[in-house]
Structures are given as C-alpha cells and as structure tokens.
Amino acid sequence: MSRDLDRGNEVLDAVGLTGDPLLARERYIDAGWHLVDQAQALLVAAQRELPAGRIR
C-alpha cells in the first residue's frame, strides 16, 4: 500500500492547478477522490486475501 501512497502523491502533483482557481480545485478534489476509491478497493481485496496482521 505504501507504493500506492507514493503513486497517489505523483498523481496529485501532476494535477494542473493553473487557470481558474475553482476549476483547479475541482480537478484536485476529483483526483483525490479517485485515489480514495482505488485505495478502498485495494483494502477490500487485501482483507479478502490476507490475514488481518498482514494489513497495515
């Protein structure tokens, strides 16, 4: 999961924040929610396949 956090930082760093500030904020928030969805899916899969002690 730590690799996914690093990837998430890369994704957010790549979000264009130029132009209209409201649109830039919307792009950043949309990218963030997409990352949350991906992390949630990864956690659900890990919980199905791994013992609880292996998930951190």
Image: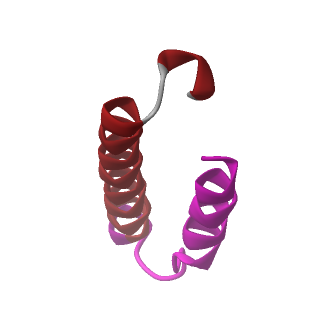
Q: 7 and 23: which one is in front?
A: 7
Residue 21, image x and y in percent?
A: 44, 66
Q: Residue at x 33, y 70 (%)?
A: 23
In which quarter of the view is residue 47 placed?
top left
Relative to 21, does residue 33 appear above or below in the rendering? above
Q: Which contiguous range is marked in magenta?
A: 1-23
Q: 40 and 16: which one is in front?
A: 40
In which quarter of the view is residue 54 placed?
top right
Secondary structure character of the magenta stretch overall: helix
Relative to 52, does residue 28 appear above or below in the rendering? below
Q: 50 and 17: which one is in front?
A: 50
Q: Residue at x 57, y 60 (%)?
A: 8
> Is residue 12 at least partly visible in the picture?
yes
Q: 43 and 15: which one is in front?
A: 43
Residue 32, image x and y in percent?
A: 42, 54
- Left/right placement of residue 24 relative to residue 56 reads left
Relative to 23, does residue 19 appear above or below in the rendering? below
Residue 6, image x and y in percent?
A: 69, 59
> Is residue 56 at least partly visible in the picture?
no
Residue at the far top in the pictured view: 53
- Location of the C terminus (image quadrant): top right
In which quarter of the view is residue 28 placed?
bottom left
- Residue 5 lies within the magenta run: yes
Residue 27, image x and y in percent?
A: 36, 68
- Residue 46 lies within the magenta run: no
Colour scheme of the rendered structure: secondary structure
Figure label count: 0
Relative to 46, does residue 16 appear above or below in the rendering? below
